[in-house]
Amino acid sequence: MSVSVSQEKTKNDIEKYRHIYVIIEHFEGKIIPVTLEMLGEARRLMDEFNQKYNSSEKVVAVVLGYNVRQLCNDLVTYGADSVIYADHEELKYPINDIDTKIIAQIAKDAEIMKKISPEYEKTFVKPRYMFFAADNIGRHLSSTVLAELDSGLASDINKLVISDLDIRHEHKTKGQSIRYEKVLEMYRPDFSGFLWTTILCLDNKNPEIFREYHPQGCSIIPGAFKPIEKDSSRKGTIVEYSPNIDHNLKIKILNRRVIKKTIDYETCKIVVSFGRGIKDNPEQNIKLVEEFAELIGAEIGITLPLSKKPYQISQQLDSKYMIVDRVIGTSGSNVMPSLYIAIGLSGAVQHISGMKDSEVVISINPDENSPIIDESDIFIKGRMEDVLPILIDQIKKQMSTVSIRSN
Amino acid sequence: MLNVGVIIKLEPDFSEGNVSYNSDGTLNRAETKNILGPHSAVACNAAFYCKVKYGAQISIGTMGPPIAETALRQAQVLTNAEELNLYSDRLFAGADTLATAEVLKNGVGKMFGGGIIDIVFSGHRASDGETGQTGPQTAWKLGYTFLGNVIEFNIDSDRKVVIAKRLISLQGMDTIIEEVESPLPVFITIDPSYRSIYNTVSQRLLLNKFRKEGRKRSEDYRQFLKVYTSKNLDLDPKRVGLQGSPTIVYRVEKIPRARTNRKTEIIDPSNPNNIMPLITKIIQLARGK
């Protein structure tokens, strides 16, 4: 039998957990796009939440850095109700240990509540939800912050829903059906790209192992959500937080060197990607793709399964192409070139989400039932071994005639 | 002599011929073999580098069912490890990353009879779970300084510090290589692009000697193996496995196909007339028209 909502309320009528905290990332004075995407999604979720639950919970942006005050107004125009910022020279660059401690301090600080939402000041214990970016910084930061706050975390999320759920779980509810309110359903595509797993972070209501798990944390895939339109008339509260910085800093940054991305998906006009369709002769087929891409000035991408190095190929090709940096899709880069050529790849959802905004899509695949066909303007039915040599040959011919004419 | 720990994981073998997919594209776990995960192998290489370059004893740990022994054995081949540790208990089953980190924390605490491990390595992420959370969470629980995405490192044994290069790649930004210095102990997750470089002849000689020894040791790996349960890891059963996991998997579903506005034209490439307009288009785009 389900425990009724009212029963739950009396047992727990003081809510200790409030708001969505969004951890902001910035670089050289610029806000990283995924941060605005997270704010946009937080805004949409919170508007719906407040209407549904008749509450006034907030989207709270948290920024650490040096000279970051000027970023705070921007965050408000992109959907934050409140911005908590810590400004300190030692925070100029992200350092996991220090940032983790400060974010955990902020998350537990009830004093700040006085300024952000005085109505919750007395009862506030920790944030209800917490969003991080699923990138090189946020992925680790989310892990350590949630370890410090002793709560749960789901990574690489691309869909979020807040709902009330009746849960029956061997351990969490001791087999009883119990209603959980305001649960964040966190959707993550699995490694195959075909399955979506919904992760929940739930309190243990079973008295034998009773424990409350808040905030419900997640890291969000860059490009998964859209920012809201910038609205300069939006108003928000900006609060400075004076962090407790340990001056015996353990880690010293000796230097930082910016290197140009060796793979440039942003400015190139054509991207050519390949997948497991190379399998009959991986070495030769990659060389074919390489020749084709070079001819038309394209950057080369791969599908996620190839980054797991499924083939025995020469070290040279392996270290150049079978790398995570070349993965197109939710586990890698989002691209939107003028032309995307998908070679021997089936079109798993996680791949499609990374290339669907391309202007023109051509795919080469022997199987008309591959999902990639839906996302193609032109589908060349055939094996890459057969099709690519024809294309290469014809392009060479036409290019030489055209260049002769233009001379 | 450094004390080096490595946390590894047994994972599905995604290599062609060993991996099996269902007709709907999902992994067929029953038919797929399991091996030492590729990112775990990179972590092993980094530990082995310490052994050759600085002199180190290596202890490998993994949480998993008894079958995970095979991963420990493969890791011993790569590292010539002195100690293999399997953290295995039915109570650990179904653990999320936080509950896994709880076990690994105590596991690291038992390496070489307890005491400080100077460096703990783990992989970038698992090929099947792909969260990348377990490493940093274990580091945090241990209270070790955490360094992620490390592509190169050197140890100054006198000063007891590590100097490491980390790769930071952010959406829409140039890549940064950050050089940091941190006192030992540290917990390092190794970037997949890491390569061990052995410059001197003496290093290469030592490397060959240790490799040979590692292969030999692995033939009789059980001699080096210690198996721990929640009891002898001094773990609170409420903090491990399903009971100790804040998160649950609520639902698994097929991702619906994305809606698309494209009208697909299907081309038979065997007829050159079909191909020609396409070629013209590709060339135009290649020339930026």
Image: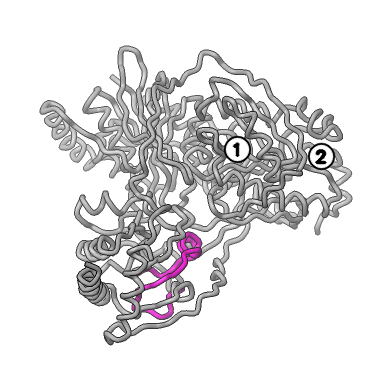
Task: Give the colouring mode of the picture.
Answer: one colour
Residue B218, percent from left and from top: 24, 41
Query: Is residue A367 visible to us here?
Result: yes
Number of the front mark, 1 or 2: 1
At label 2, the amino acid type is Glu
Say if A206 sits above or below B224 in the image.
below
What x and y, as percent, mark residue B170?
47, 42
Mark 2 surroundings: few (<14), some (14-19) or many (≥20) residues within 10 A: few
Residue A309 vertical placement versus A93 (above, below): below
Q: Chain of mark 1?
A: A
- Under circle 1, the secondary element is loop
Magenta-highlighted residues: A344-371
Q: CA distance from mark 1 to mark 2?
A: 26 Å
Task: Please give left or right for residue A349 compared with residue A366 in the image.
Answer: right
Q: Earlier in the sequence, mark 1 or mark 2?
A: 2
Quarter the N terminus of chain A occupies: bottom right
Closest to the observer, B82 or A321:
A321
The mark found on residue A15 in the picture is 2
Residue A348 or A234: which is nearer the viewer? A234
Name the quadrant containing residue A14: top right
Element assignment for label 2: loop
Disc number at residue A199?
Answer: none
Q: Quadrant of residue B222?
A: top left
In x, y percent, where is residue A84? 69, 31
